Image (cartoon, rainbow, N blue to C red):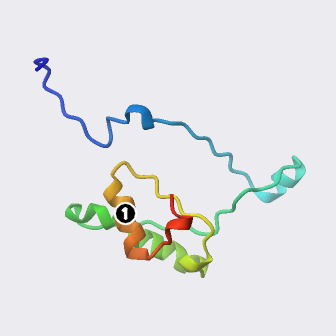
Amino acid sequence: SSGINAEYGGANSSKISDGAAACVLMDSETAVKLGLTPLARIVSMADSAGPPIKFPIAPVRAMELAMEYAGITVADLARVEVNEAFAVVALACQQLLSIPDEIYN
């Protein structure tokens, strides 16, 4: 033992899976003016909360609401990304929303 009293978890132990990403958001008029082709568009958003003990399924209701607001279902989605530190959350979302492996992160 090193004598260091430390705890490691999903939020502080990225190891080699660490990465980076960037996203540029703009309205469609600006994209056209700049000669850019949009790769995606935001059609709705939602949030939801629940008891802390149920954190693994917290995003599910928000995802259901966002799809409801947009008038779409999982069948209408081309790709689904759940950016979450704990794998159990991503797995719970996939299972509870019946998201096919082929379109899931």
In the rendered structure, the answer to whether residue 55 lies left or right of residue 100 reads left
Q: Please state which of residues 93 and 68 is positioned toward the viewer in this rendering.
A: 93
Outermost residue to the front = 102
Outermost residue to the top = 2
Q: Is residue 58 above or below residue 13?
A: below
Q: What is the count of numbered marks?
A: 1
Whole-percent x and y of residue 50? 28, 67
Residue at image coords 84%, 50%: 36
In the rendered structure, the answer to whether residue 18 lies left or right of residue 8 reads right
Which quarter of the figure has residue 56?
bottom left
- Residue 51 appears anywhere in the view: yes
The residue identified by callout 1 is: 91
Dot 1, how many residues are within 10 Å of its Cα: few (below 14), some (14-19), or many (20+)?
Answer: some
Whole-percent x and y of residue 87? 35, 54
**Quarter of the figure that contains the N terminus:** top left
Which quarter of the figure has residue 55?
bottom left
Residue at image coords 89%, 49%: 35
Residue at image coords 38%, 36%: 14
Whole-percent x and y of residue 97? 43, 75
Whole-percent x and y of residue 61? 39, 73
Q: Please state which of residues 101 and 10 is positioned toward the viewer in this rendering.
A: 101
SS for tag 1? helix
Q: Is residue 16 above or below residue 72?
A: above
- Residue 45 appears anywhere in the view: no
Residue at image coords 87%, 54%: 32
Q: Please state which of residues 62 and 4 is positioned toward the viewer in this rendering.
A: 4
Report the amino acid beneath label 1.
Answer: Leu
